Amino acid sequence: MSNVKAVVLSAYEKPLEMREYPDITSLDAGEAVVRVEMAGICGTDVHLWLGQLAVPLPIVLGHETVGRIELLGAGLDKDWRGAPLAVGDRVCWASSLVCGECYFCRVKRQPTRCTSRKAYGISYCADHGPHLRGGYAEKIHLRLGTAIFRIPESVSTEAVIGAGCALSTAVHGVERCPIEWGDTVIVQGTGPVGLAAIAVAKQAGAAKIIALGAPAHRLELASSFGAAAVINVEGVIDINSRRAAVLHETGPYGADVVIECVGYPEAVNEGIELVRDGGRYLVLGQYANAGNISFNPHTITRKQLTVQGSWGFEPRHVDRALRMLEIREWSAKFASEVTHRFPLSEANAAMETARLHKAGKTVLIP
Ligand SMILES: [Zn+2]
Ligand SMILES: [Zn+2]
């Protein structure tokens, strides 16, 4: 029996290791094996590598993956949308599986908070069979119940990976914190989630989008994604000057919606001051726990703000992200985010490139 190569995180802050696991030749009903074409390196992977989120080591990293179906278990003949699914089809999938039975799944309809939610590339210890449960590998094994999506011919693999988990995350966030047609929107942060938030805001009908971010090459992307004005947070370091620059663009009252996609807690204090009275603030970027800050809740009461959080995404958000990528303009823009390609054997160099934010999107091509 042949072996399958996979890149494994076995100790935090240590080099990733190449391991081999037995190939999977038989499946139970509803399962699938996918041969990986491209795996994206997400900021979360860097956090995992650095030990900033607890995971069951060793793990095969990778929750943004595109590949071709190699094996299908009995009964799995349709994708999540009901389209026929066959060996050889190019697919992606929702990275998380929920139980559908817990209090949050069933009663409160907050499946992203499922008490037994599991994500490929994050939640599965690679010591347990079938081992291959992350994208940094030649193949991945998909469990029964995984929301698999056949990718339309018109949507490139680069577009799907360039959009990554960020686009589905932004779709979910904006669903919880709606943008109305004609709104003025500020996006804090020009990483993958920030760019996706700009795209979703634009698609949702925002009349003017202002992006706060850095460095210069990310601001160029922000402009190409639809930001009418960009402010370089490294160039305008004083928060009051930054606020003045933003208000110059929004008008004196601030923005209808501000979306935080930064991840540094201090960004929340800055962002909440940029929301107009009665406006909405979406805290989307605080994925890792970066600690406490001093904060004045009087602002929320006085300004009558709606403050919203959003965690991960559901399959239906992946569905809408893919629909957005069927619009040629968006697929081209997201594909342009993929700038650095590495083979599996150079996963450590790839990780380092992603950690230093040198690249647009860094990907692995097994
Ligand atoms: Zn991610
Ligand atoms: Zn559940």
Image (spheres, helix red, strand yellow):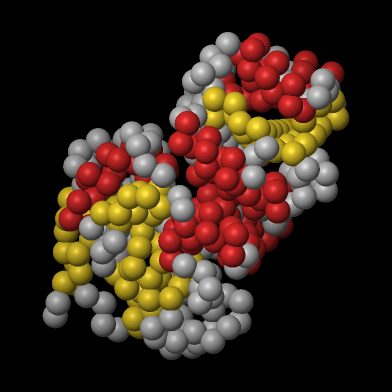
In the image, taking residue 292 as reference, residue 347 lies left or right, namely left
Q: How many marks?
A: 0
In the image, taking residue 339 as reference, residue 24 lies left or right, namely left
Q: Residue at x 40, y 48 (%)?
A: 361
| Closer to us: 216 or 279 | 216
Q: Residue at x 59, y 65 (%)?
A: 328
Q: Quadrant of residue 84?
A: bottom right
Instruction: Give the percent coordinates (x, y) of residue 276.
Output: 81, 26
Q: Quadrant of residue 198?
A: top right
In the image, taking residue 115 as reference, residue 142 lies left or right, namely left
Q: Residue at x 49, y 37 (%)?
A: 218
Q: Which quarter of the rendering shows the C terminus?
A: bottom left
In the image, taking residue 319 as reference, residue 122 lies left or right, namely left
Q: Is residue 99 shown to the viewer in this render?
A: yes
**Quick check: 126 above or below 44?**
below
Instruction: Give the percent coordinates (x, y) of residue 110.
Output: 66, 53
| Closer to us: 287 or 124 | 287
**Quick check: 277 above or below 134?**
above
Q: Which quarter of the rendering shows the N terminus?
A: bottom left
**Quick check: 350 above or below 318?**
above
**Quick check: 256 above or below 67?**
above
Q: Residue at x 52, y 69 (%)?
A: 155
Instruction: Give the percent coordinates (x, y) of residue 213.
Output: 54, 30
| Closer to us: 33 or 281 | 281
Instruction: Give the percent coordinates (x, y) of residue 294.
Output: 60, 13
Q: Is residue 306 shown to the viewer in this render?
A: no
